[in-house]
Image: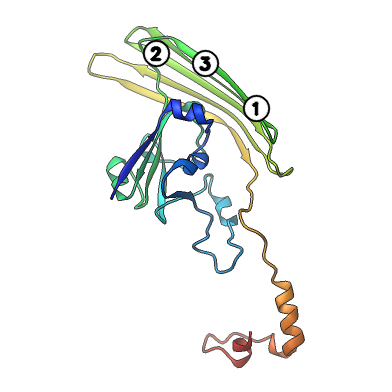
Amino acid sequence: AASVSVRTREFLDDIGLVEIDEITRYSLNTVLDTDDMDGDNPNFTTWHNAVYTTQRIRTRGVDATRGVDYFKSILPDDTYKIARYDDARGPNGVLFGVSNAGGMLNESSLFAKTYDDFGRIRYSFGTSSRNRAEFRYNKALVEDKFAVLVAGLYQDNGHWRDWASHEKERFYGALTYKPTKRITIRANFEDGFEHKTLVQPSPMSDYGLPYYDNLLAFGVENLLFTPTGGNPSSAMREL
């Protein structure tokens, strides 16, 4: 079975969601990939995700794709420039763009509207030093012909862990030009800065005490050996 769920602008504003990482909590069978299926010990590491600018997502246990306007995205997302999110679960996500077998969680960017002038300023604060401000303004320079949209974001969020934080300074712009009734040309641009301190989602593992216990039980000569690439030795089997 396949399904598509839409997270509208109204839903995002009502719940206060600002990132895909938060939206996964409201998505069926969709979770952040914390390597809990790949680890070989209780301390499933996520440090290799530091090479990614965004954390991977799994849908129904399979890798899913983050998308921007139905193209693969490698950039951190944020709702200050998003019209809505579409969650296409399962391989049917391929029909809507470039997607992995798990599906696609796509963000539809805001575009300038040629029929009206509007804008908004929004500020939010909360526990754990939440501090976030954003603005958006749309201007129809030539009615039904040419319009521009600008949006900006400043965020300086803390965390209940003193050392964790998430800072953002981002700017977004979009243009819409309609030379004829049947032709529409759109362009957008984004620039900015983002820094996030990652939090290890699982507890640390202790490998020192097991080694020390085996050292007392079997002696150092049974703990040190040279791997041969063949069958395990008796010392290996004892461990």
Residue annotated with mark 1: 125
Q: Distance between the residues labelled 2 and 3?
A: 17 Å
Q: Residue furthest right?
A: 216
Q: In which quarter of the image is residue 205?
A: bottom right
Q: Distance between the residues labelled 1 and 2?
A: 32 Å
Q: How crowded is mark 1: few (under 14 residues within 10 Å), some or many (20 or more)?
A: few
| Residue 142 position (above or below residue 198) | above
| Three-letter code, disc 1 | Phe
Judged by depth in the image, the label closer to the viewer, 1 or 2, is 1
Residue 82 tag number: none
Residue 147 tag number: 2
Asked which secondary structure carries label 2, the reply is strand
| Three-letter code, disc 2 | Ala
| Three-letter code, disc 3 | Arg
| Residue 144 position (above or below residue 26) | above
Q: What colour scheme does the image use?
A: rainbow
Q: Is residue 190 left or right of residue 28?
A: right
Judged by depth in the image, the label closer to the viewer, 2 or 3, is 3
Which mark is first along the chain, 1 or 3? 3
Residue annotated with mark 3: 120
Residue 196's x, y, as percent?
A: 63, 41
Q: Which residue is rendered at x = 57% and y = 56% of the image? A: 48
Q: In this view, does 235 lie to the left or right of 143?
A: right
Q: Residue furthest bottom?
A: 234
Residue 174's x, y, as percent?
A: 43, 21
Near-viewer residue (187 or 237): 237
Judged by depth in the image, the label closer to the viewer, 3 or 1, is 1
